[in-house]
Image (cartoon, rainbow, N blue to C red):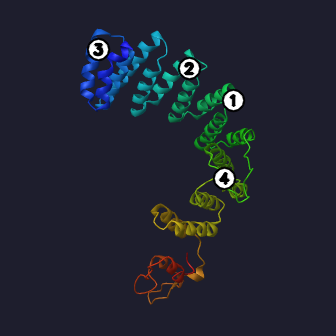
Amino acid sequence: VAMSGKLTGVYDALDHGNYKGCLKLCATLLKKEPNNALCKALNAFALERCGRRDEALRGCEDAHACAQSVGVDDTVLSTCGAVYRRCRSFGALCQMYEAALAKDPDSEDFATCLFFALLRQEDFARAQQVATKLFSKHKKQKFLHWVVVAMLLQSRASGDPKVLGLASMMLTKAPINFEGLGQGEQVQFNRSRISLVLLHLDTLRMQGKVPEALELLEKCKEVIKLPTDVVEMKTRLLVQAGKHTEAVAEAKARTLKSPSDWGVAKDYIRLAFECPVPEAALRRKAPTPSGEVDVVDHAARLRLAGEALPSIPTLDDVEKNATEDE
């Protein structure tokens, strides 16, 4: 209580964005208590906010060293962690939580912080090990999900197909519950269930098992609450399967459902140009006196067919102006 009272002014200065004033208060307090780890951590936080990142990182190292001499202080760790993240010093962040976890091996919070720090450092193999230990110790389903996430990130980074096989095997311990699906009833929102469906879909997609992924998506579309998300995922899977025509049809339907969404429109435009078009639907370049041959004019796709752009005041007029070329 006495310590928190001494730091009240420091916290008030931080809350009001008065970082230079905070530095002055910390300097005054550190003259009286040079080993005050929390004050050093707050001083480092203020230094970072003032743009003095090198000094802030040195201050965090000093604060962590002081805190370790007396035990693990959650507040010091979280304050230093904020500085390390803002400075993108993820190696130091990992080392700090590894040291904390070594002193308190049963701490779920420290292991969780270490897992996310390792993900930021892109050390996915070690993140998988930490998540595996969390699942073994605490038996929570979300930690099994984290194991699979780390495996998928490993595979994406290294291209190793063996990791995907392990991820698929781990997911057998977390099967999807299809109860209540396909019966026309309202499915209650469940974030964990959605995450599990997405993990299964991503694993199948990365393994190249697109038909299985499409089948699973069709079964679980009621779990994913936004219909536009279902259409987007289906479109990506169809593109991966090389079914561009079907993908364009899905993207077109999505665009008509959300005509004000520019991101959706861009996806549709991109897919439309990637979609193969029959040569019969394109104009041809006529032979010229200079000897130009009679060939398909692919550039005609970008030119207007008439004198001016067609008038399309409503979505109903879209189909009226449709051509053979999507």
Q: Mark 1 and mark 2: span between their CA atoms?
A: 18 Å
Looking at the image, is 40 positioned above or below residue 321?
above
Q: Secondary structure at mark 2?
A: helix
- The amino acid type found where label 2 is placed reads Leu
Q: Which residue is mark 1?
A: 139
> Looking at the image, is 154 positioned above or below residue 283?
above
Upstream in sequence: badge 4 or badge 2? 2
Query: Of label 4 and label 3, which has the lower sequence position?
Result: 3
Numbered label attached to residue 187:
4
Q: Earlier in the sequence, mark 4 or mark 1?
A: 1
Quarter occupied by the N terminus: top left
Report if the CB atoms under discs 1 and 2 are less than 8 Å apart.
no
Q: Position of residue 11 (x, y in %)?
A: 33, 25
- Asked if 205 appears above or below 302 in the picture, the reply is above
Q: Are marks 4 and 1 in contact (CB under 8 Å)?
A: no
**Callout 1, which amino acid?**
Lys
Q: Earlier in the sequence, mark 3 or mark 1?
A: 3
Tell me if label 3 and label 2 are in contact, CB under 8 Å.
no
Secondary element at tag 1: loop
- Write down the quadrant of residue 33 in the picture: top left
Residue wearing tag 2: 101
Residue located at (37% from left, 24% from top): 57
Give the residue number, with chain letter if any, for mark 3.
29
Most foreground residue, 18 or 232: 18
Q: Residues within 10 Å of mark 3 (few under 14, many from 20)?
A: some
Viewer-nearest of labels 4 and 3? 4
- Give amino acid for label 4: Val
Q: Horizontal and vertical percent for residue 12?
A: 30, 27
